[in-house]
């Protein structure tokens, strides 16, 4: 199961471009001794793990003559960082694949036999959102698996003669979860209360609090060591947490506005549980409390379900309608386990037609997951539009200035790079901050034959892209600023010589963006410029939507 899960999570890892949240640069800096990350949105522990993966890449490259030493290794990063991204993505896939054996061991612990526990593990193998998220080197996948590992360790802690050992292991798993993302608190907080409640009923409150204390001590000892970069720059970390709050919390949404969004998300076949598992997940406690249930540790399962439900509702109320696909990944993974366990326990408990109905239901739910996972893999391995687009631009507009909402697989010209540096420095100066120093290897000193004058569309970071961010009070950091009004005026770019504009997902940007500036800019593009070419979406999961090329030379 682990091998199949690993294959699904790493096949197509080189899907054509890099994700903005993949902090490979911070991981590379760790190898030079720089433990403080460039951005403190998340704890640096995942950067340190990625640095280990990159170190493994260095050793592999020495054995295969990719480079002969550290100097060539460093130069390779600036020439083509793809192998470095892949090393981190493979590590993410490895961590994500651990969900399968954890599902199996947990299912065995609550009383399922080898075959039924194996099927529970298979649900983790083909969990579509898990497969999708593992293709990007972000901490969300590792966070979800670490949170589930806490549940596994808790189930192992019950009815054991080695309580202290498992108290320590629980603490280690919690430290790992908080090392990947501090948002682990949103699930593990309610889970901790559930664990104390179950242990108090079984062993008494004194034993429960002692167990909690041991795990807490382990967490408090390990977490600072695992995330030493935060302690070395605590002011920077706190500043980025204020920005994170602005990015995540939607104060303009009414109370409970996000709940319908959450329900739709959980029922989604690809980004949620799918309708079958959602239905089973919702009624799971009814089965756990029924006389027909043959599972062990039913009190723990009910408490875990309640904790997960409370966590889900709390997150939905907190963030409002802005709910990206990774937001509920730990909760969804746990609900998949609970639903799969219920299905397998019902399947083994009945005979005749009821058994057939449950078997069909299980196969249908599992089949929906397989189909959605196949869609993920298909999109991951599809040829990016950017490849065809780059050829078209080189042939049709070789001398034009191009603004692109899609990363192009062609080099920038020296002039384009300097234009972007000047723009960023200008925005930073408005806020009284300075941009980070650019590595000398990153500076373009001569134009290659295939270079084009293209720059990125100046989108703010996700979460700072709404109108509310324009008036929000937060300590602006490099790249972490709201939309700039002048940069979202078409004439600003036309007067600077830009005449070709590439738009990624025009319908959304023109009609649904949270930013009035962005909506108006794209409406003006449609009104004033010539629609030159449209490419149908190939990789919408990987943020490559329908691509539209506008020719604004006559605007």
Image (cartoon, rainbow, N blue to C red):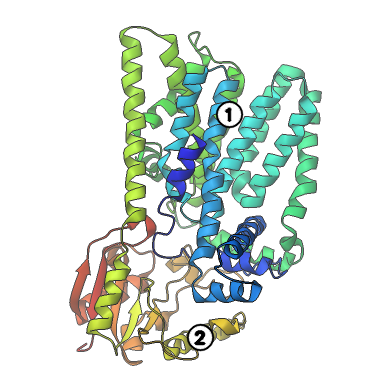
Disc 2 target residue: 421
Disc 1 target residue: 304
Can residue 21 be seen here? The reply is no
Q: In this view, does 173 lie to the left or right of 526?
A: right
Where is residue 146 shown, x and y percent of the image?
61, 42
Q: Name the N-terminal-most of marks 2 and 1.
A: 1
Where is residue 250 shown, x and y percent of the image?
48, 56
In the image, residue 433 sits, relative to residue 240, either above or below, namely below
Rendered residue at 51%/37% (across/down): 2
In the image, residue 489 sits, relative to residue 252, either above or below, namely below
**Image quadrant occupied by the C terminus:** bottom left
Rendered residue at 75%/59% (across/down): 228
Where is residue 209 shown, x and y percent of the image?
78, 30
Q: In which quarter of the image is residue 550?
A: bottom left
Where is residue 141 shown, x and y percent of the image?
53, 47
Secondary structure category for the residue under label 1: helix
Rendered residue at 27%/70% (across/down): 388
Rendered residue at 31%/57% (across/down): 382
Mark 2 nearby-residue class (10 Å; few <14, some 14–19, many ≥20)? few
Q: Is residue 39 left or right of residue 368?
A: right
- Distance from label 2 to label 1 (Cα)? 50 Å
Mark 1 nearby-residue class (10 Å; few <14, some 14–19, many ≥20)? many
Residue sitting nearer the eye, 412 or 329:
412
Report if the CB atoms under discs 2 and 1 are less than 8 Å apart.
Answer: no
């Amino acid at each position: 199961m682990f091998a199949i899960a690993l294959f699904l999570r790493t096949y197509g890892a080189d899907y054509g471009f890099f994700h903005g949240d993949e902090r490979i640069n911070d991981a590379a800096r760790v190898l030079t001794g720089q433990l403080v990350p460039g951005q403190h949105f998340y704890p640096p522990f995942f950067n340190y793990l990625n640095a280990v993966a990159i170190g493994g890449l260095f050793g592999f490259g020495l054995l295969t003559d990719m480079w002969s030493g550290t100097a060539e290794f460093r130069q390779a990063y600036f020439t083509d960082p793809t192998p470095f991204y892949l090393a981190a993505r493979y590590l993410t896939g490895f961590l994500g694949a651990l969900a399968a054996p954890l599902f199996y061991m947990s299912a065995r612990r609550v009383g399922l036999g080898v075959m039924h526990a194996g099927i529970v593990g298979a649900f983790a193998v083909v969990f579509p959102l898990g497969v999708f998220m593992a293709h990007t080197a972000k901490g969300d996948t590792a966070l979800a698996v670490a949170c589930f590992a806490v549940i596994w360790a808790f189930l192992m802690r019950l009815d054991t003669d080695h309580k202290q050992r498992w108290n320590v292991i629980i603490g280690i798993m919690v430290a790992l979860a908080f090392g990947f993302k501090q948002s682990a608190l949103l699930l593990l907080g309610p889970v901790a209360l559930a664990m104390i409640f179950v242990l108090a009923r079984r062993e008494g409150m004194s034993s429960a609090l002692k167990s909690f204390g041991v795990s807490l001590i382990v967490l408090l000892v390990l977490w600072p060591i695992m995330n030493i970069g935060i302690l070395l720059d605590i002011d920077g970390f706190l500043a980025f947490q204020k920005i994170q709050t602005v990015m995540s919390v939607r104060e303009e949404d009414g109370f409970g506005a996000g709940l319908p969004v959450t329900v739709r998300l959980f029922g989604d076949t690809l980004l949620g549980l799918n309708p079958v598992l959602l239905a089973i997940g919702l009624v799971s406690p009814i089965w756990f409390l029924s006389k027909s249930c043959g599972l062990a540790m039913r009190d723990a399962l009910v408490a875990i379900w309640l904790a997960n439900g409370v966590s889900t509702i709390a997150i939905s109320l907190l963030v409002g309608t802005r709910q990206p696909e990774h937001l509920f990944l730990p909760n969804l993974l746990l609900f998949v386990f609970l639903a799969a366990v219920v299905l397998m326990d019902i399947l083994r408990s009945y005979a005749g037609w009821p058994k057939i109905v449950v078997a069909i239901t299980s196969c249908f739910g599992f089949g929906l997951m397989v189909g959605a996972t196949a869609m993920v893999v298909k999109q991951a391995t599809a040829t990016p539009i950017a490849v065809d687009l780059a050829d078209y631009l080189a042939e049709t507009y070789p001398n034009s200035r191009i603004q692109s909402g899609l990363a192009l697989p062609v080099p920038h010209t020296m002039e384009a790079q300097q234009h972007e540096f000047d723009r960023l420095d200008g925005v930073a100066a408005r806020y009284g901050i300075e941009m980070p120093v650019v590595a000398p290897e990153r500076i373009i000193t001569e134009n290659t034959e295939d270079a084009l004058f293209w720059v990125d569309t100046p989108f703010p970071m996700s979460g700072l892209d709404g109108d509310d961010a324009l008036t929000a009070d937060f300590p602006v950091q490099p790249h972490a600023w709201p939309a700039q009004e002048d940069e979202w005026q078409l004439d600003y770019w036309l007067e600077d010589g830009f005449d070709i504009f590439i738009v990624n997902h025009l319908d959304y940007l023109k009609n649904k963006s949270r930013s009035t500036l962005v909506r108006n800019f794209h409406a003006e593009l449609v009104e004033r410029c010539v629609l030159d070419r449209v490419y149908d979406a190939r990789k919408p999961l990987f943020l490559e939507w329908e691509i539209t090329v506008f020719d604004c030379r006559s605007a």
